[in-house]
């Protein structure tokens, strides 16, 4: 089971993240300061650290060298409220693997965690992401169902990967839009029509390949990818 | 006009006036004094003639050159006495001016007419010399003053120019205030002290504003993240009825809206506060390509035909802002386009032109860039304000026109463009 350390000083946010990630079957540990994070890291093996930068006893960046040095193989995702590009760059330069900017979608954080997990442990199993009869090969930009190529476009494959990463979860159209277009569309609700267009196309291609009807509408809100 | 030129102009006109008036004054005074002198001499002469009638009558006319006396027998009924100027022709035919005093004397029962003349030419000569001297002295004074001013100007105004340089080089982002050394000139000392105080206050205000924007941008995000996260968690719970779900969705939508509004407003005020000091040389065509790729899906879904004419245009700008600028314009051109419309992007010379077909007619030019001016259900009405702010920051000229059913935005990068090739 993947062990995650959530370093975030805001209790409500810490627990919100914890709630969502536990639902994904991760083992989560919590820390509200640099000092506590330091102790937790020493106590146990951690696969991934979700690191808020703005902590009461210092900048989260300070923790990155320690993690990189003493806990090789531990992934780091920075959680930052800072929209400043320099802060992200500083974090990535210090050795973080990825970042999310507040306010992020939990589904987005989850997708990034899964992607990071794949990158961190390529040796464990195949590079593919499986869901029932569907296999997505993120690195090859290829996607098959029952061994047959689905012929998805890059965006459709990204969408499918996002859906599978958050399987059995209700995904809002907004979070899908943000994922697919990197936030560029977010100030225009009509972009949600494009989410709909992509979902429709994906569904068609999956049906043509004889996949199960996994892509379900959640009325007025979004979609859910589920085998149930 | 330079201060020096202006000062000198005033000085010269003032000095010339003084020279003119004082020369005229000197002239009038001398005129009066010499005239008076001649009158007195004539008067004394008359008294002398009247006192020694016999001698003068016997001696007859006298000619000492510039003083003459004519005496001739006169009949009865001649004017008793008169004073006036007269001109007398000499041997060479030249005229000479004299002051003439004539009167009648009676001697031994006969009347004699006496004319006393004194030349006025000495007087004119004297006046001329004095006037010339006055003018020479005055002009020497004026010229030497001018010369002195020219020489001392730079020295006197050195502190002033130092202050001007300091103001020009003042960079509010550096957080420094203007500090000038002591000036020997009181006024410039006052200027530099006032400048120090003013820039100190500006820097403080600026720092406060910057801190406020930073707090705004930072502190809002966590509560928004919690709200969004909790709502997303609630969506995951089974067993909620449709009404509850719709209410949750409304909360969720508005959290998203608040988040968008907030980040855009923070961005706007950051631009206004010039908090994007880092610039780089960027290729506009490259940015256009990158943004077009991002919006390709959207344009494709609307079946918009795209035409691109890409010249080479390099600009010196902040990369993030250049991206926002281009992406907002392209996004608008797609968003407000009609099904099956067209979108044209043209990079030529120093300008970028984006034109698109639209659903409605021309936009209201007056309110085009106003914040929240066109709150369509589709957007926040902040996109073009952002464009305008960024253009304003870099002195980019933006121009909107509408013709043949096409909206057209032309950006003239002007001073921001760095010459290529």
Image (tube, coloured by chain):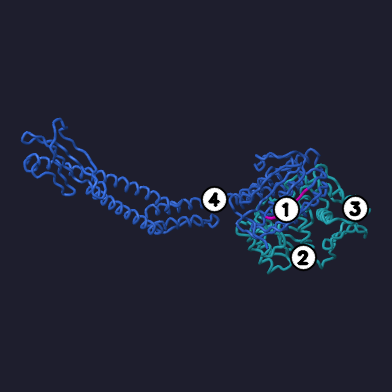
Classify 10 Å Cα crowding around label 3: few (below 14), some (14-19), many (20 and above): many
Which segment did they paint magenta?
A: B343-349
B282 sits to left or right of B235: left
Q: CA distance from mark 1 to mark 4?
A: 34 Å
Q: Main secondary structure of the magenta part?
A: strand
**Residue B278 at x, y percent in the picture:** 62, 58
- In the picture of the structure, the residue carrying the numbered disc 4 is B208
Nearer the observer, B116 or B160 = B116
The chain that hosts pointer 2 is A
Which one is closest to the eye, mark 2 or mark 3? 3
Q: Is residue B266 visible?
A: no
On residue A206, which mark appears? 3
Which chain wears blue? B
Q: Nearer the viewer, mark 3 or mark 1?
A: 3
At x 85%, y 65%, the residue is: A126
Q: Earlier in the sequence, mark 2 or mark 1?
A: 1
Mark 2 and mark 3: span between their CA atoms?
30 Å
Where residue B387 appears, as percent x and y from the top left, is: 67, 48
The answer to which of B185 and A17 lies nearer the viewer is: B185
In magenta stretch: residue B347: yes
Q: Residue furthest top?
A: B77
Mark 4 or mark 2, which is nearer to you? 4
Q: CA distance from mark 3 to mark 1?
A: 32 Å
State the image coordinates of residue B43 (x, y, percent, origin top left).
Answer: 14, 40
Chain that bears disc 1: A
Would you name the residue on which mark 2 appears? Answer: A120
- Identify the residue at horizontal 80%, vertical 63% (top origin): A118
Q: Which residue is mark 1?
A: A17
Q: Nearer the viewer, residue B255 or B384?
A: B384
């Amino acid at each position: 089971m993947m062990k995650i350390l959530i370093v975030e000083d805001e209790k409500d946010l810490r627990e919100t993240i914890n709630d969502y990630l536990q639902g994904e079957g991760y083992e989560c540990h919590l820390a509200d300061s640099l000092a506590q994070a330091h102790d937790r890291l020493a106590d146990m093996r951690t696969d991934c650290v979700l690191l808020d930068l703005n902590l009461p006893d210092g900048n989260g960046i300070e923790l990155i060298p320690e993690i990189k040095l003493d806990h090789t193989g531990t992934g780091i995702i920075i959680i930052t409220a800072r929209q400043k590009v320099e802060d992200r760059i500083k974090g990535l330069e210090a050795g973080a693997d990825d970042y999310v900017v507040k306010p992020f979608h939990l589904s987005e954080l989850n997708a990034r965690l899964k992607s990071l997990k794949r990158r961190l442990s390529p040796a464990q199993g195949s590079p593919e992401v499986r869901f029932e009869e569907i296999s997505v090969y993120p690195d090859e930009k290829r996607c098959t169902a029952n061994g047959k190529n689905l012929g998805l476009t890059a965006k459709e494959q990204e969408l499918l990967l996002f859906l599978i990463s958050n399987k059995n979860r209700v995904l809002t159209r907004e979070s899908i839009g943000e994922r697919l277009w990197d936030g560029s569309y977010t100030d225009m609700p009509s972009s949600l029509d494009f989410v709909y267009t992509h979902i429709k196309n994906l569904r068609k291609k999956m049906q043509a390949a004889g996949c199960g009807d996994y892509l379900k509408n959640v009325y007025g809100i979004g979609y859910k990818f589920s085998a149930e | 006009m330079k201060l020096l030129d202006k000062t000198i102009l005033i000085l010269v006109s003032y000095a010339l006036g003084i020279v003119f008036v004082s020369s005229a004054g000197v002239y009038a005074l001398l005129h009066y004094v010499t005239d008076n002198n001649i009158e007195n001499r004539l008067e004394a002469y008359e008294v002398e003639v009247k006192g020694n009638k016999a001698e003068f009558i016997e001696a007859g006319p006298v000619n000492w050159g510039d003083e003459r006396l004519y005496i001739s027998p006169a009949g009865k009924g001649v004017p008793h006495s008169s004073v006036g100027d007269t001109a007398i022709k000499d041997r060479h035919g030249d005229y000479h001016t004299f002051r003439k005093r004539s009167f009648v004397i009676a001697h031994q029962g006969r009347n004699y007419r006496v004319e006393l003349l004194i030349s006025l030419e000495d007087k004119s000569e004297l006046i001329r010399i004095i006037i010339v001297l006055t003018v020479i002295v005055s002009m020497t004074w004026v010229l030497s003053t001018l010369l002195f001013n020219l020489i001392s100007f730079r020295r006197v105004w050195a502190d002033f120019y130092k202050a001007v340089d300091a103001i020009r080089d003042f960079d509010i982002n550096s957080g420094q205030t203007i500090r000038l050394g002591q000036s020997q000139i009181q006024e410039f000392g006052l200027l530099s002290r006032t400048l120090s105080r003013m820039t100190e206050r500006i820097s403080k205000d600026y720092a406060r504003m910057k801190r406020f924007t930073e707090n705004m941008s930072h502190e809002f995000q966590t509560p928004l993240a919690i709200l969004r996260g909790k709502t997303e968690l609630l969506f995951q719970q089974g067993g909620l009825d449709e009404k509850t779900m719709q209410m949750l969705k409304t909360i969720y939508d508005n959290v998203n809206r608040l988040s968008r509004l907030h980040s855009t407003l923070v961005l706007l005020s950051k631009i206004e506060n010039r908090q994007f000091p880092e610039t780089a040389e960027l290729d506009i065509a490259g940015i256009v390509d990158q943004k077009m790729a991002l919006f390709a899906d959207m344009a494709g879904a609307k079946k918009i035909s795209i035409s691109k004419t890409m010249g080479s245009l390099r600009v010196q700008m902040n990369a993030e802002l250049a991206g926002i600028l281009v992406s907002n314009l392209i996004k608008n051109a797609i968003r407000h386009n009609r099904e099956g419309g067209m979108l044209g992007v043209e990079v030529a010379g120093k300008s970028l032109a984006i034109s698109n077909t639209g659903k409605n007619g021309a936009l209201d030019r007056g309110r085009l860039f106003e914040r929240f001016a066109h709150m369509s259900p589709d957007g926040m009405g902040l996109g073009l304000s952002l464009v305008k702010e960024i253009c304003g920051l870099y002195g980019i000229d933006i121009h909107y026109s509408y013709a043949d059913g096409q909206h057209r935005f032309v950006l003239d990068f002007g001073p921001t463009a760095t010459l290529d090739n």
